[in-house]
């Protein structure tokens, strides 16, 4: 393990344009459950399958049930950044890390102080009325009784990308731009199974790829450095000069 940590540190030290691509595993050390691990949300029993609940058609047709799940399982307002989030902020402040591309909606990268965060799947911190587009913060939504409603009477929807919904083109294009310029790509805490987000890494043109994930992924054989350990423990050990 020490050899891999040394190799990771050396790759970071010699790189000048690092891009980080992260998934749900980045936030598990902050107390937020991931989706696909054995203890993840998708392996828990609910009235409806979680993957169906988090779909566009379910939100439209079963809004009350959607919000019961959303408020119960996706409220992470009290969560704080962990070692991974904090190290990435440090790395951004040194000028080495140019962008964080995240599949998470928890806003913990911003809480840690990171600036260039590309949220592929949106954020719980942005919510909009479906009729008049008025903005509402996360506290309003999570503290509302039943279905959160706008002052105009219409339903409020979190600015999160549900199944059957397209990703934001501007964010996608920005992510592609950053990946195309990077000389080091660090991928962490993701199974790389969620399309189209996972396909973005194909736009990386650099030489070195670091993949940190406890479970096996289909991308393992393409990694320059593969670390199958707890990513929070890895980032705790990296140097911050």
Image: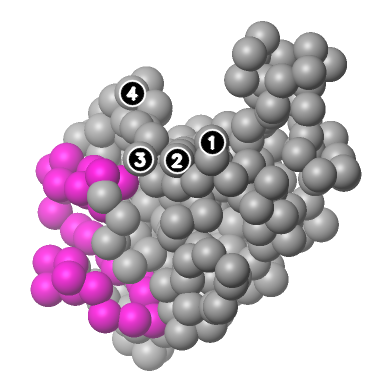
Secondary-structure class at tag 1: helix
Q: CA distance from mark 3 to mark 4?
A: 15 Å
- The residue that disc 1 covers is 60
Q: Residues at badges 1 and 2 in contact (C-beta under 8 Å)?
A: yes
| Label 3 vs 4, first from the N-terminus | 3
Q: Quadrant of residue 218?
A: bottom left
Residue 164's label in the rendered image is 3
| Label 3 vs 2, first from the N-terminus | 2
- The residue that disc 4 covers is 169
Give left or right: position of 170 versus 206. Answer: right
Q: Is residue 239 visible?
A: no
Q: Residues at badges 3 and 2 in contact (C-beta under 8 Å)?
A: yes
Q: Which is nearer the eye, 56 or 42?
A: 56
**In x, y percent, where is residue 104?**
52, 51
Q: Quadrant of residue 143?
A: top right
| Label 4 vs 1, first from the N-terminus | 1
The residue most toward the front is: 61
Q: Which is nearer the eye, 75 or 17?
A: 75
Secondary-structure class at tag 2: helix
Q: Residues within 10 Å of mark 2 (few under 14, many from 20)?
A: some
């Amino acid at each position: 393990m020490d050899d891999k940590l040394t190799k990771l540190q050396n790759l970071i030290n010699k790189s000048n344009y690092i891009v980080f691509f992260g998934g749900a595993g980045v936030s598990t050390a902050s107390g937020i459950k991931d989706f696909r691990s054995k203890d993840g949300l998708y392996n828990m029993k609910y009235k409806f399958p979680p993957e169906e609940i988090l779909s566009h058609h379910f939100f439209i047709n079963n809004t009350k049930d959607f919000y019961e799940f959303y408020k119960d399982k996706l409220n992470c307002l009290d969560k704080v950044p962990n070692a991974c989030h904090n190290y990435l902020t440090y790395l951004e402040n040194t000028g080495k890390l140019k962008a964080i591309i995240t599949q998470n909606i928890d806003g913990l990268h911003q809480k840690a102080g990171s600036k260039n965060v590309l949220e592929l799947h949106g954020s719980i911190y942005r919510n909009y009325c479906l009729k008049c587009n008025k903005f509402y913060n996360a506290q309003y939504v999570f503290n509302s009784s039943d279905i959160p409603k706008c002052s105009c009477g219409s339903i409020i929807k979190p600015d999160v990308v549900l199944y059957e919904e397209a990703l934001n083109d501007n964010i996608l294009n920005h992510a592609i731009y950053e990946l195309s310029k990077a000389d080091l790509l660090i991928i962490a805490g993701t199974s790389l199974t969620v399309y189209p987000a996972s396909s973005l890494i194909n736009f990386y043109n650099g030489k070195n790829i670091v993949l940190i994930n406890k479970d096996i992924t289909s991308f393992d054989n393409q990694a320059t450095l593969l670390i199958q350990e707890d990513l929070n423990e890895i980032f705790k050990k990296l140097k911050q000069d």
